[in-house]
């Protein structure tokens, strides 16, 4: 690979946030010596001490100033304190080795009173909205008292864990404690102090890179290429008998995704980077890929090719804002209003969120005589499984390789419609990332 020169000296940490014990955090650290050596390191962040399940009434505690149970808060700090990559980042920061930044996949503030979400979350971002603090706490209390786990896990617990991470890095950077009130923390995440502590949503970064909303500018695209051409590796340590380094399968998947990224970046600047996308079906390495997206935008921030997602600077300073790479908005052939309608129109127009299209899938399945489920194909194309019937069109032998997860057969087909070799193999591809990997490998040998 070409030498990834041009990345300045520094360390930029991306953190994906969850609340389940097996993946409270996931880390990606980009390190550059400023002379051509770029390292991209990955580490998992499971709980390695006592940590509560993400259950109502157990994980949260509204009687505490952080609204987390003591066990959840202490457990989150323990993960950060014992992370190999966090320690490496901290050492670089304290030694003054170039620029340092951290980007956390969680909101650093709450909506201003009178709004149902933050201004930054109204700018084509598909995520659970963050209401005003009073509304957030009222809903948190209600769901907790009802024992309603689902909304707490989807829109509350991970945000509270994210605030732990923001406080942790804000304290490292300023050498002062950051407890509540939240306003002080939000304000720090919007200034240019060193280190720069930011929030970033991988889903937003993907859309501004892969053509759904826009394409990266030349500067941010070149930076991404240089990172992709660096040395990618797993890192970790042993704590309380539990390892944090990604296993071989995770690293193999990440390296394959990196190759797709490099292949995409070889096209001209105006082309979407299709490999910059959310990994479907949530395989174990997907959160590490999201952590890389966060580290990338932190790196963009340091290199002058990143900025905040905001149309109201005053509200941004009050509410916090998402960090994004510099991008050029996608031009539409017709007006489409509203973020959800824009995404749906692009999906319908292209039938794909990656480099693979439906005709590629059908060609591969027919050539290899292997079946794939509606769910796997839909996940790869970026559409709902219910849409597969209309996309496949009239029943025919070529399309019969796309089958039901339950029966292993195409829905509504007669025996005459089936490919004669449909049941020749017992194997059925059930995961979209597995289907994508096989298609790409098949393409290479054609």
Image (cartoon, rainbow, N blue to C red):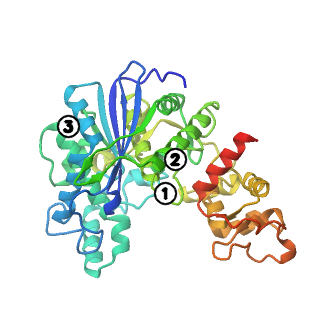
Q: Mark 1 packing: few (<14 Cα in 10 Å), some, or many (20+)? A: some
- Closer to the N terminus: mark 3 or mark 1? 3
Mark 1 → mark 2, Cα distance in angstroms: 10 Å
CB atoms of marks 3 and 2 within 8 Å: no
- Closer to the N terminus: mark 3 or mark 2? 3
Instruction: Please name the residue shown 18% across and 69% down the image.
Output: 62
Where residue 29 sits, quadrant-wise, is: top left
Task: Tell me the element at label 3.
Answer: helix
Q: Quick one: which residue is furthest to the top in this view?
A: 35
Residue that mark 2 sits on: 253
CB atoms of marks 3 and 1 within 8 Å: no
- 323 lies above or below 351: above
- Which numbered circle lies on residue 173? 3
- Closer to the N terminus: mark 1 or mark 2? 2
Residue that mark 1 sits on: 283
Quadrant that contains the N terminus: top right
Q: Is residue 343 visible?
A: no
- 137 lies above or below 1: below
* In this rendering, position of residue 346 left or right of residue 128: right
Q: 19 or 424, which is in the foreground?
A: 424
Q: 140 or 280, which is in the foreground?
A: 280
Residue 73, percent from left and from top: 20, 59
Q: Nearer the viewer, mark 3 or mark 2?
A: 2
Where residue 349 sits, quadrant-wise, is: bottom right
Task: Tell me the element at label 2.
Answer: helix
* In this rendering, position of residue 195 left or right of residue 153: left
CB atoms of marks 1 and 2 within 8 Å: yes
Q: Quick one: which residue is furthest to the left in this view?
A: 176
Residue 141, percent from left and from top: 24, 74
Where residue 422 sits, quadrant-wise, is: bottom right
């Amino acid at each position: 690979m070409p030498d990834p020169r041009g990345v300045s000296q520094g360390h930029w940490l991306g953190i994906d946030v969850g609340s389940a014990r097996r993946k409270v955090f996931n880390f990606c650290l980009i390190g550059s010596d400023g002379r051509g050596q770029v390292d991209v390191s990955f580490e998992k962040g499971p709980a390695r001490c006592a940590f509560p399940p993400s259950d109502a009434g157990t994980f949260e505690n509204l009687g505490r100033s952080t609204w987390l149970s003591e066990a959840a808060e202490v457990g989150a700090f323990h993960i950060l304190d014992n992370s190999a990559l966090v320690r490496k980042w901290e050492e670089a920061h304290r030694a003054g080795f170039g620029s340092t930044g951290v980007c956390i996949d969680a909101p650093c503030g709450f909506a201003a009173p009178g709004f149902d979400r933050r201004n930054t979350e109204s700018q084509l971002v598909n995520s659970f909205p963050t209401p005003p603090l009073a509304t957030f706490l009222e809903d948190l209390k209600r769901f907790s008292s009802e024992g309603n786990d689902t909304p707490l896990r989807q829109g509350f617990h991970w945000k509270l864990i994210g605030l732990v991470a923001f406080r942790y890095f804000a304290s490292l950077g300023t050498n002062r404690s950051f407890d509540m009130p939240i306003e002080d923390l939000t304000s720090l995440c919007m200034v240019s102090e060193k280190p720069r502590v930011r929030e970033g949503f991988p889903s937003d970064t993907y859309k501004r890179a892969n053509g759904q909303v826009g394409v990266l500018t030349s500067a941010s695209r070149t930076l991404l290429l240089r990172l992709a051409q660096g040395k990618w590796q797993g890192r970790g340590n042993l704590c309380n008998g539990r390892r944090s380094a990604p296993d071989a399968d995770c690293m193999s998947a990440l390296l394959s995704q990196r190759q797709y990224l490099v292949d995409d970046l070889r096209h001209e600047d105006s082309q979407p980077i299709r490999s910059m996308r959310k990994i479907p079906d949530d395989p174990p390495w997907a959160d590490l890929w999201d952590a890389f997206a966060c580290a990338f935008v932190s790196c963009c921030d340091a290199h002058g090719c990143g900025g905040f997602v905001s149309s109201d600077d005053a509200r941004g300073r009050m509410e916090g804002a998402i960090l994004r790479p510099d991008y050029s908005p996608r031009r539409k052939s017709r007006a489409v209003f509203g973020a959800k309608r824009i995404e749906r129109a692009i999906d319908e127009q292209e039938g794909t969120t990656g480099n693979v299209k439906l005709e590629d899938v059908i060609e591969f399945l027919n050539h290899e005589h292997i079946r794939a489920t509606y769910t796997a194909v839909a996940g790869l194309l970026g559409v709902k499984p219910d849409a597969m019937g209309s996309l496949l069109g009239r029943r025919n032998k070529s399309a019969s390789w796309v089958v039901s997860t339950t029966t292993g057969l195409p829905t509504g087909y007669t025996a005459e419609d089936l490919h004669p070799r449909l049941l020749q193999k017992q194997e059925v591809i059930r995961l979209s990332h597995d289907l994508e990997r096989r298609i790409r490998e098949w393409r290479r040998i054609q």
